[in-house]
Amino acid sequence: MLDEFYLGVDYGHKKTGLAIAQNIIKKSRPLKVLYNDYILEINKVLDEWNITKIIIGYPYHTEESKIHDDIKSFIEDLKSSISSSIEIIVQDEQLSSESAKASFAEMRNHGLIKKKNSDYDDISASIILQSWINENIID
């Protein structure tokens, strides 16, 4: 199997979290939180890390709403700006934000991170990405 890198995305209106993973170690980690120019910033990450797959969180477990349409629109915009060789995969993000909030609070309490209280979106992206890895990458 080739050495591949994957990008996890937790899309949001005000900010979007990114996470990175490598197929060899099969572990994701938070990368950064974006506050604007999502497509441009994601393209920079794609170039820097030579990403082969983008895993985007999608709230399948909730009733259809504006965020569903916004995520679909974001995916279409992203598709039109990247190489067709990069696969975009939609992954259920059920409970990723709640898990991220809990993980974030625990890390802050232990002094492991010093980020603002609201900047846990990259942790959510990491949870989404790790969930996809656990379901799809075979040892």
Image (cartoon, rainbow, N blue to C red):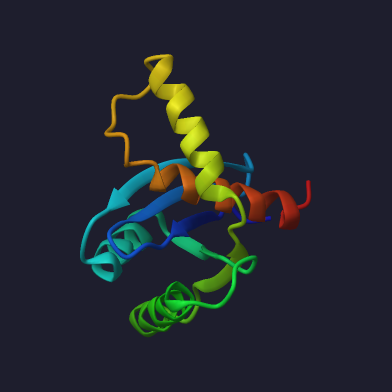
Residue 102 versus residue 111 in the image, above or below: below
Query: Residue at 37% across / 15% down in the picture?
Result: 111
What residue is at 62 percent from the left and 69 percent from the top? 60
Q: Residue at x 57, y 66 (%)?
A: 59
Q: Quadrant of residue 62?
A: bottom right
Task: Tell me residue 133's x, y (percent).
Answer: 66, 52
Q: Nearer the viewer, residue 131 or 94?
A: 94
Q: Is residue 132 visible from the viewing direction of this image?
A: yes
Would you identify the image quadrant in which residue 38 lies? bottom left
Q: Residue furthest top?
A: 110
Q: Position of residue 57 (x, y in %)?
A: 53, 62
Q: Is residue 22 visible?
A: no
Does residue 59 appear to the left or right of 40 in the view shown?
right
Residue extending farthest to the left is: 36
Residue located 69% across and 55% down the image: 1
Q: Nearer the viewer, residue 29 or 124?
A: 124
Q: Is residue 37 above or below residue 136?
A: below
* Residue 25 at x, y percent in the picture: 62, 39
Task: Count up the numbered dots.
Answer: 0
105 versus 25 height, above or below:
above
